[in-house]
Image (spheres, rainbow, N blue to C red):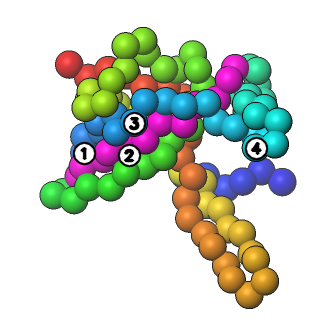
Amino acid sequence: MAKPFARVDVSESLFMIATLPVPKVKNQETGEVATDRATGAAMYIVNLLETSGGQAQVLKITVAEPGLPEGLAPGMTVRPVKLIASPWANVFGDQVNSGLSYRAEGLELVK
């Protein structure tokens, strides 16, 4: 069953690189890196600081390696391309944790 997702409107937001991309680990025991199901490209996690309407938050976004421009550095302004949000939930006993996961096709440098 496919996850429900929603396209995120980024037109009114400013995004800055908070941390450099790191490989998304699929298996903690083996260190296996997650790959895109469609292309087989390695997946990376990058933290972006989003500011909008006088508020700020850090978004942890998954991006396939080909979508990451060269030379990224903390503080650089970027725009996520085709950013989507997917809800998730985990149940541990009587505790429920939930949130949103974010994925983008790529990041564009903003000049």
Relative to 68, 95 lies left or right: right
Q: Amino acid at mark 1?
A: Glu
Examine the structure image and report whether residue 12 is included in the region drawn in magenta: no
Secondary structure under tag 4 reads: loop
Residue 104 in picture, x, y percent from top left: 52, 35
Q: Amino acid at mark 2?
A: Asp
Pointer 3 residue:
19
Q: Nearer the viewer, mark 4 or mark 3?
A: 4
Q: Residue lying furthest front in this view?
A: 29
Tell me where residue 17 sits by quadrant.
Answer: top left
Q: CA distance from mark 3 to mark 1?
A: 22 Å
Pointer 1 residue:
12
- Please determine whether, in this image, residue 105 is positioned above or below residue 6: above
- Please determine whether, in this image, residue 93 is positioned above or below residue 82: below
- Labels 2 & 3 near each other (Cβ < 8 A): no
Q: CA distance from mark 1 to mark 2?
A: 8 Å
**Residue 67 visible within the image:** yes
Which residue is found at the position 68% from the left and 68% from the top? Answer: 89
- Labels 3 & 1 near each other (Cβ < 8 A): no
Task: Give the mark nearest the N terminus, 1 or 4.
Answer: 1
Which region shows up in magenta?
41-52
